[in-house]
């Protein structure tokens, strides 16, 4: 039996179709990576294609690594010559060789999000931008969106002027200045890596033709996530030979907020006339019940290519939907359910729509002493000590990187004051040179004084480190020299033994990473190492061998799979998000695709949960079950909490009565000065009074002051724990038929008001069709009469 006999008929057809444009619609868990890697092997071994004529593009380093390993296991010779990389890594390799054609040097720096924020902050300060009108993060987002659409600063300015929008004109000015400073620093941000490669191809036909001839067979994974510039890049490369195979699933297109354009996959046949379409619909991951639930949800989308997942796996259990009084009860139940089922813990994933939902799950895991991994937390490479060491390495590699040099000029402290730095900066700008070049000429800087000697020590050290690298000193020794000769290690020790040890452990891990790179790379270089670090994503560093419960957003979960999955927060306004409900059908369809992605992460068991009340912006709000739950028929979904004798608002009243102490405990604060518990996790309940459990439940040592004795709870009061009470208003300043405003749902008309005893129950018909009619307690709705 050969390698291809193990493939199903549709996978084989995708493998054997090698000439001309091909669209492979690969459903979740349908073995697309297997089909792609076998296709590479087939091209080399059966079609006689040279390995270096094949390009395979993925979206993450992790996926690229897996594909590379699989190809190596299938092909006896030449697999290492196949280019398997992410879009960004591909562009870096091209630019390192040819970027001088568009005015940069090949030792350019790559700015991560932290670097770009720092640069924009400097621009805001220098141009005296009103931060009440514009925010650095918002401007960077607009610039990124423009780059994704291949809109230059000049084009952006013309558009802003045509619209007569002063705010857009100001952003255009900032965009121009931002690009100017990046160029001066010989640096590119992530978006530039793609944009500049396209610019290179469009301006230098000979370079484009070189890569067109090099990559005669092109494959692109996760094509539904491509944006305009990525689409343009692939189209340019494939224009000559048209042997392009794109693999993707329009039902899993969930990155519109990052610029992904679902039209790229939906209109592939229009872009590449004569394209063949193959559907991979057999799922190898999930049970039949889980797939039926996913199919029922996604078929409500209209903007999609028709396909239905099926499987030969067992029928399995119906997914379960559970409702809880509050988000606290929801988290408590999920974690207890995991404890009840037992390890291995890495089999469990808790998925949610927003990062803010993770906090309560973290606290419950800590309370139960369960090991967990929060994906999307602080990236290893964003930690201060790691950024410091990397900036030393960046300065050694590219002296024109002003941001890197300015970060470390006084780290560790050298007695070089802010005024001295400002004078050097001014000297650099007046003489059209980089900040580091100005440092090397410090003696010539007006008014620099004694600081010139301290600056000289710094530049001498950088020169020494450069010499070490040139002499091929092991990278470990170079980093150790940086730590010792600059005094960085000694300054860390001054922070305290525990803090220093933690930071040094992180630096040791960076050294391990550098050594590993140097040992595995064919032609190791500092620039190449720095670009590998810059392009790493949080999901790439996830260690699947760690036995920990995974906490992550639904967006982060794409491409992963777990035996047991919990989808938490299945409530309208949370999932689907309120913004999507306001925006309209296109945004809602993307949320539905996100739900489909979440459901199809589960292999054996899927549990969906919702809360009847949730703390939002400091206020407890009633919640409505997500419409996505209603799209799953009962034949596919078990709902043990459904009880017609105790519906809707009776449950809501119970939700408020049963809210745990966490809802408003004055002592719910972190214990240490650093806001962390002893084990390093953020802990909110360390300073609780004696007798109060982690779950807000009172032990015998703590008695409710209203339970007995002379004190009595005030009438018409809902109690949410100590110091958190809401009194029923004596009257309302609005009546039936009045127009009112809700801080979350917007404007609406009061349809009815009922006296519920402990509070008024108000029914409002909101203007926005997606919100509809809602019933809520007056004390929490805080409606304002219009």
Image (tube, rainbow, N blue to C red):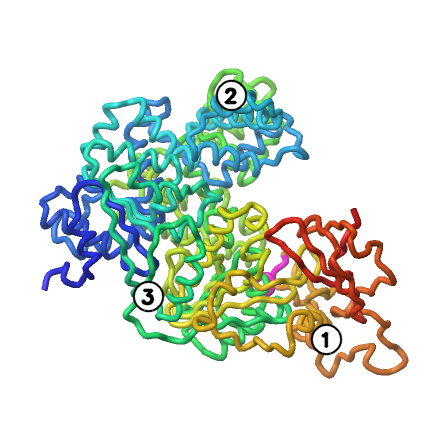
Q: Which residues are magenta?
A: 675-682
Say what secondary structure mark 2 lies in.
Answer: helix
Residue ID at (59%, 52%): 770
From what the image shows, is residue 184 above or below residue 32? above
Residue of label 3: 285
Chief SS of the magenta region:
loop
Distance between mark 1 and mark 3 Cα atoms: 48 Å
The verdict on residue 677 being magenta is yes
Distance between mark 2 and mark 3 Cα atoms: 51 Å
| 1 or 8, nearer to the observer | 8
From what the image shows, is residue 345 above or below residue 412? below
User: Where residue 690 is drawn, which disc sits there?
Assistant: 1
Residue ID at (33%, 56%): 307
For the image, the number of numbered tags is 3
Say what secondary structure mark 1 lies in.
Answer: loop
Residue of label 2: 158
Specify few, some or many for label 3: CA neighbours under 10 Å numbering under 14, 14-19, or 20 or more: many
x, y (%) of residue 312?
28, 70
**Among the two numbered marks 1 and 3 on one chain, the one whose residue lies closer to the N terminus:** 3
């Amino acid at each position: 039996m050969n390698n291809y006999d193990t493939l199903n008929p549709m996978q084989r057809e995708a493998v054997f179709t090698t000439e001309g444009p091909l669209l492979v619609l690969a459903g979740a868990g349908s073995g697309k990576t297997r089909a792609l890697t076998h296709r590479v092997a087939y091209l080399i071994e059966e079609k006689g294609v040279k390995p270096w004529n094949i390009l395979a593009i993925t979206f993450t380093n992790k996926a690229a690594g897996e594909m590379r390993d699989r190809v190596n296991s299938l092909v006896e010779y030449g697999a290492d010559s196949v280019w398997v990389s992410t879009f960004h890594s591909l562009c870096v390799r091209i630019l390192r060789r040819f970027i001088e054609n568009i005015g940069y040097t090949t030792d350019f720096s790559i700015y991560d999000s932290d670097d770009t924020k720092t640069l924009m902050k400097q621009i805001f300060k220098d141009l005296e931008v009103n931060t009440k009108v514009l925010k650095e993060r918002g401007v960077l987002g607009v610039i990124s969106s423009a780059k994704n659409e291949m809109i230059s600063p000049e084009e952006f300015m013309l558009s802003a002027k045509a619209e007569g929008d002063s705010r857009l004109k100001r952003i255009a000015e900032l965009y121009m200045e931002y690009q100017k400073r990046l160029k001066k620093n010989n640096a590119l941000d992530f978006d530039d890596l793609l944009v500049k490669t396209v610019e290179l191809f469009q301006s230098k036909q000979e370079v484009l033709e070189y890569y067109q001839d090099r990559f005669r067979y092109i494959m692109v994974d996760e094509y539904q996530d491509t944006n305009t510039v990525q689409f343009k890049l692939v189209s340019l490369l494939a224009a000559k030979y048209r042997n392009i195979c794109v693999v993707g699933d329009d039902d899993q297109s969930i990155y519109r907020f990052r610029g992904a354009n679902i039209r790229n996959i939906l209109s592939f046949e229009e872009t590449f006339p004569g394209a063949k379409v193959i559907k991979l619909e057999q799922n190898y991951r999930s049970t039949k019940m889980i797939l039926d639930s996913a199919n029922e949800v996604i078929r409500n989308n209209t903007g999609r290519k028709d396909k239905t997942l099926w499987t030969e796996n067992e029928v399995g259990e119906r997914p379960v939907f559970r409702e809880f009084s509050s988000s606290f009860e929801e988290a408590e139940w999920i974690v207890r359910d995991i404890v009840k089922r037992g390890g291995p813990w890495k089999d469990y994933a808790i998925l949610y729509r927003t990062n803010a939902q993770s906090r309560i799950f973290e606290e419950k895991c800590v309370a139960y002493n369960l090991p967990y991994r929060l994906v999307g937390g602080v990236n290893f490479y964003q930690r201060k000590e790691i950024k410091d060491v990397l900036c030393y390495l960046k300065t050694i590699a590219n002296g024109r990187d002003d941001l890197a040099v300015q970060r470390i000029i006084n780290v560790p402290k050298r007695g070089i004051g802010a005024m001295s730095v400002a004078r050097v900066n001014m000297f650099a700008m007046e003489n059209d040179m980089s900040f580091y070049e100005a440092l090397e000429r410090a003696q010539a800087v007006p008014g620099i004084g004694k600081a010139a000697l301290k600056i000289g020590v710094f530049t001498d050290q950088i020169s020494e480190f450069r010499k070490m690298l040139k002499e091929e000193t092991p990278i470990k020794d170079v980093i150790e020299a940086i730590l010792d000769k600059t005094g960085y290690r000694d300054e860390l020790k001054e922070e305290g033994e525990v803090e220093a040890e933690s930071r040094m452990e992180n630096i040791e891990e960076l050294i391990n990473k550098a050594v590993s790179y140097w040992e595995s790379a064919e032609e190791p270089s500092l620039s190449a190492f720095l670009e590998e670090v810059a392009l790493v994503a949080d999901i790439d560093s996830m260690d699947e061998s760690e036995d920990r419960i995974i906490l992550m957003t639904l967006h982060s979960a794409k491409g992963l799979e777990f035996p047991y999955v919990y989808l938490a927060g299945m409530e309208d306004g949370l999932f689907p998000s309120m913004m999507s409900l306001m925006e309209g059908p296109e945004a809602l369809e993307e949320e539905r695709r996100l739900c489909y992605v979440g459901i199809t992460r589960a292999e054996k068991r899927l549990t969906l949960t919702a809360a009847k009340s949730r703390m939002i912006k400091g206020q407890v709000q009633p919640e409505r079950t997500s419409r996505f739950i209603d799209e799953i028929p009962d034949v596919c979904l078990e709902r043990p909490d459904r009880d017609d004798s105790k519906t809707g608002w009776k449950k809501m009243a119970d939700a408020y009565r049963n809210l745990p102490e966490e809802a408003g405990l004055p002592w719910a604060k972190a214990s240490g000065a650093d806001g962390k518990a002893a084990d390093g996790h953020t802990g909110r309940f360390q300073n609780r009074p004696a007798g109060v459990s982690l779950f807000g439940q009172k032990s015998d040592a703590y008695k409710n002051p209203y339970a007995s004795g002379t004190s009595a709870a005030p009438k018409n009061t809902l109690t949410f724990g100590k110091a958190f009470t809401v009194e029923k208003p004596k009257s309302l300043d609005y009546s039936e038929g009045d127009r009112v405003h809700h801080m979350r749902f917007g404007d609406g008309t009061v349809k009815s008001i009922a006296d519920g005893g402990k509070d008024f129950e108000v029914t409002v018909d909101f203007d926005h069709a997606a919100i509809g009619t809602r019933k809520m307690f007056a004390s929490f709705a805080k409606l304002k009469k219009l």
